Amino acid sequence: MTAPTINGTRYPQPIEDLLPAARDLDLPDGEVFPSRNRLMREFRIGAPKAGELLALLKTTPAAPPADTAEAATPDPAPAPDAPEPAPPAVPDPIPAPEITPPTWPAEVASVSRPDTPAPPAPVRSAVVWPVVLLALPAFVAIWSGWVGLGGLTGFGIVHPLPGIWDSFSINSAITLPIGVETYGAYALYVWLSGRVPERARRFAKWSALGSLAIGALGQVAYHLLEAAGVTSAPWWITTAVACLPVAVLGMGAALAHLVRTHD
């Protein structure tokens, strides 16, 4: 079996060369494209190649005749006329008025619903300098009272660095006002700050009240002994005063631990 002669050759032709011949086949009335079997029979090709040729027939439009293509080609559009140059603009003798942009107020009050509560006005913090003025005379009275009571209960001049600095001396009575009153003020601050755990707040509350009460009792004891002309305090007052530095150390360490411990 030999292939049909197309384009002067009997060898198998590529699909692109078979496509014009397939378009020129005579088709029965009502058929638009030849069937695959007819393409196989006419061009002596296999089913895959016939199927591919049929797909090209359906998807590739036929080229129009040469005379029709020439007739369909539109005439080139005439070149547009060059625009005439515009005359130079003459400046307007009357200058245009300046437009000033509107100025808006710095703050615009926000419109809220009638049932929306207004935010609270900022509250200014109270000044604290009067506390310093009040603390100065209290410091003098408390300091002198504790130092005097310390002298009546055995506190006095000591040499804390014997053999190292023999000439260095200190009055141990100053440990009473520094320890008791300083701890009372610090515990009062911790209690009222509201920024510590509840256990630390409770401990600071009661220890602050106790420290202030002990400080008041110490001042009362000193003035009573001084007014009575006593030069040496009774043993029970001496015992209580001697235990104050140790008690202050314990309460301070406990409060510092509770402040850093979260519930």
Image: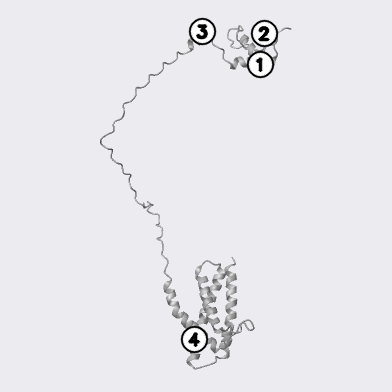
**Is 31 drawn above or below residue 209 in the view shown?**
above
At label 4, the amino acid type is: Val
> 117 and 123: which one is in front?
123
Q: Residue 96 in the image: x percent, y percent?
A: 28, 38
Q: Which residue lies furthest to the bottom in this view?
A: 229
Element type at mark 2: helix
On screen, residue 96 versus residue 2, left or right, reads left
The x, y position of residue 55, in whole percent, is: 62, 17
Mark 3–mark 1 distance (CA, rounded to whole Å): 32 Å
Q: Which residue lies furthest to the left in this view?
A: 94
Q: Mark 3 points at which residue?
A: 67
Q: Do the residues labelled 2 and 3 touch (CB within 8 Å)?
A: no
Three-letter amino acid code at disc 3?
Asp
* Number of on-image labels: 4
Q: Of callouts 3 and 1, which one flags the residue occurring earlier in the amino acid sequence?
A: 1
Q: What element carries label 4?
A: helix
The residue that mark 1 highlights is 51
Residue underneath mark 4: 220
> Label 2 is placed on what type of residue?
Glu
Do the residues under discs 4 and 2 have CB atoms within 8 angstroms? no
Quarter occupied by residue 199: bottom right
